[in-house]
Structure formats: structure tokens, C-alpha cells
Image (spheres, grey):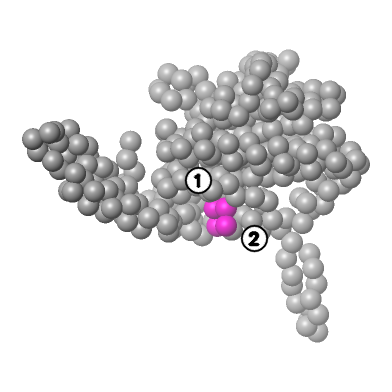
Amino acid sequence: MALEFEKPIIEIQQKITELQKLSDKHVDFLPEIKKLEQKLAEIKLKVYDKLSAWQRIQIARHPKRPYTLDYIQMMMTDFIELHGDRLFADDMAIVGGLAKIDDQPVVVLGHQKGRDTSENIKRNFGCAHPEGYRKAMRLMRMAERFDLPIVIFIDTPGAFPGIGAEERGQAQAIAENLRDMAQIRTPIIATVIGEGGSGGALGVGVADHVIILQNSYYSVISPEGCASILWRSATKASEAAEALKLTGEYLIKFGIVEEIIPEPLGGAHYAPIEVAATLKASILKQINRLKALSLDELVEARYKKFRKVGQFTVASAVGAAIEK
């Protein structure tokens, strides 16, 4: 699947493929292929070097982008999936369980989307119900009990807003996760691997160290939702994406995330193993750093980190700066 801005790249790739098929011992198209490959490299650099916020969002939503279970398979071993919230049901939009990163046992969980229509229906397009957030908290409590670090993958357009979810306490489930994650006495590392939409993402995002992949986003609302509210038209989504400042470079400045993991040209789906290896090294580094803290220091640092988010300065009538 080619995105709109990737079409010039796809056209050249198709020409190269065609020439390679036509080339044989009687007709040599190697000089033409080399010229096209050079042109392809130049266009790729031009297209991907300065992506807009909206283009990064399109990459974050790419159907071939690695999902939570893909990263678990590439980074971890001995994964045992655990199910259910012990209250209502098992929400397949959030997966989780026990695993190992090298020799380090962890509890891992995250949003999971589908690759086709039937799987997307099963996974609810990665939009969790309240039982999904309660399952996530059950796993985190288990991690705390057995002194296991928690590794989280965030990838959702938002929590499911349906009537059933609201009747079963969607807002309360997310609010309780925010409260309880702030007090969990074990290291928490969260990575935004695709979409980080609103409370659906934040409901599993209160972590000691938050990482974001280069072409992912983390926002209080989707660009389409923002555009519908401000401009009464979802067609203004690209403008909303710029205004929301939802990509890694802004999130680092705002103190929302601590680290950006680079992606290859075109996105993580072009070299998933490479991205997974980089992410794995970063997660292990943070686990070792956080394990060196006492549990009291860990929880206090997490609390202070999130208290700093949203600080601003105003001027009083006499010109003195007041921090809020």
C-alpha cells in the first residue's frame, strides 16, 4: 500500500523492477537501472527527510507497520499471553502477559490492531473497552507483586467510545489506571509504536520512561476530531495535525516523552527487525537504570515527572514571573 506522497517513489521502484525482469544476457539494462536507483535514493531522501506532521500520522497508521505482537516476537522470548479482567470479559484490543527480554523477565502489554477486516473486528481496531484497561491493570499489579518491570506498547486511535463501553465504565477504568499507574512500585517503560490517541493511549501511558518511534504521534485528540471541532470539517485534519504539535520533536520539548527512536526511510515497516533491535536496547537500558532506584525514589520520580507536564509561566501586574 502506497501513501499519496510516496507515489513518485513507487513509480521508480516499479520501473526498476520492470527493467530487471527484461534484462538478460542479450539485453543489458544495468546502466539504466543504476541511474534509476540513484534517482530513487535522491527522491526518497527528499520525500522522507522533511515529513509534515500529517504525513507522519499516515505512516503511523500504515497497515504494514509492526504492532505489539510483532515487537514481542522480535524482541522477546517465552511469551505467555494472559487473558481477562476477572470482572467481565477478555478485551482482544489489549494483549499482555509474561515474557523475557534476553534474561530479564518482564510483564508486557499493549494495544493490538488487526491486519485484515476480520482481525480488526476481533481487535476492535485497537480501541480498547474498559475491560481492556482493567486487564492491563491486573497485569501491572501482578508485575508489582512479583517485582517484574513492565513494558508497554501504545498503538491506538483512542479508547472505544461506544454505548456498551460507557455503560461498563470506560472513563472510570481509564481514570483508575492513571491513578494506580502513578503508584505502581515497579519500573514502567512505555513506547508509542504507532498511534497515541487521547485517553485510550494515556490509560496505559503513565510510565517512568516514555519512548516514541520517529513516525508515531501522541495527542489529546485525533487530527480529524480536532478539525471537526474547530473547523467543522475533518478535511482540515492536516492543519490540525500541525497545530497539535503531536510528533516526537515537540513531545520531547514539552516533557511528554523522554526519547525518540529513529526509523528507516519510509517507516518502521521497511526494516522492522532493525527498529525492534534499537528499541530493545533502549528498553533494557532503562530497565537497568530504573532498577537501580529504590521503590520510593522510583514512584516519587514518576510523580514529579508528570506534575511538570503543562507547567507555564505568567507575568504579574508588577512584572514578576509566576510559575504555575
Q: Nearer the viewer, residue 90 or 286?
A: 286
Callout in the foreground (1, 2): 1
Going by the image, does 10 lie left or right of 110?
A: left
Going by the image, does 29 lie left or right of 129?
A: left
**Residue 137 appears in the figure:** no
Residue 147, image x and y in percent? Answer: 84, 27
Going by the image, does 247 lie left or right of 168?
A: left
Q: Callout 1: 10 Å neighbours few (<14), some, many (20+)?
A: many
Residue lying farthest to the front in this orientation: 25
Residue 204, image x and y in percent? Answer: 68, 35
The question of residue 246 being in magenta is answered with: yes
| Quadrant holding the C terminus | bottom right
Q: Callout 2: 10 Å neighbours few (<14), some, many (20+)?
A: few
The question of residue 243 being in magenta is answered with: no
**Residue 16 appears in the figure:** yes
Q: Which mark is residue 263?
A: 1
- Region rendered in magenta: 245-249
- Label 2 element class: helix
Q: Nearer the viewer, residue 131 or 29?
A: 29
- Label 1 element class: loop
Please report the residue visible at 56 percent of the width from the left and 35 percent of the height from the top: 276
Q: Which residue is mark 2?
A: 253
Quarter-of-image position of residue 96: top right
Please report the residue visible at 65 percent of the width from the left and 39 percent of the height from the top: 281
Quarter-of-image position of residue 18: top left
Residue 1, image x and y in percent? Answer: 33, 36
Please report the residue visible at 60 percent of the width from the left and 26 percent of the height from the top: 72
Q: What's the residue type where badge 1 is placed? A: Glu
Please report the residue visible at 14 percent of the width from the left and 36 percent of the height from the top: 23
